[in-house]
Image (spheres, rainbow, N blue to C red):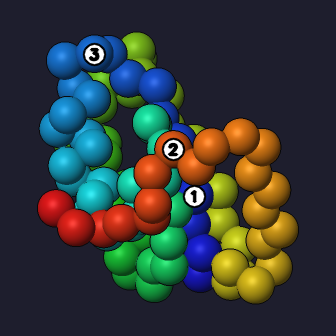
Amino acid sequence: MYVIITYDVEQHKVNKLCQYLRQYLNWVQNSVFEGELTTAELIEVMEGVKKIIDIERDSIRIYTLPSEKTLKKLLIGKRYREPTNIV
């Protein structure tokens, strides 16, 4: 499935969360990751995220689609960064 994850977390957690998500997804913009995951990988990602964040203060949004083919992406302005999953 194609997954988009966005987050709004306390500043001191940003780097740790970013490094964690880069193991699984492409970092496409500040606080935005996307890419293909299996159901098992998504569960693994969600469990790992729960260990990093404070569920009372931080917010994670996960959007799932059957595949990237079902997603229409529009970009206005400069591409912030090339999609990459290189750690």
Query: Which quadrant holds residue 27?
Result: bottom left
Task: Compare residues 71 and 46 and report the one nearer the observer.
Answer: 71
Split into 4 quadrants, where in the image is the N terminus? bottom right
* Relative to 78, 11 lies left or right: left
Residue located 22% across and 67% down the image: 86
What's the amino acid at mark 1?
Answer: Ile
Q: Give the percent coordinates (x, y) of residue 44.
A: 30, 67
* Quadrant assignment, res 23: bottom left
Quarter location, residue 82:
bottom left
Image x and y of residue 15, in percent: 20, 34
Q: Which residue is mark 3?
A: 11
Q: Helix, strand, or loop for circle 2? A: loop
Q: Is residue 48 visible to us here?
A: no
Q: Residues within 10 Å of mark 2 (few under 14, many from 20)?
A: few
Q: Is residue 25 visible?
A: yes
Q: Is residue 14 left or right of residue 28?
A: left
The answer to whether 72 appears left or right of 86 in the picture is: right
Q: Which residue is mark 2?
A: 80
Q: Amino acid at mark 2?
A: Tyr
Residue 18 numbered mark, or none: none
Q: Are marks 3 and 2 in contact (CB under 8 Å)?
A: no
Residue type at mark 3: give it: Gln
User: Mark 3 vs mark 2: which is more N-terminal?
Assistant: 3
Read off the residue under disc 1: 4
Query: Residue 36 location in percent, x, y?
Result: 50, 79
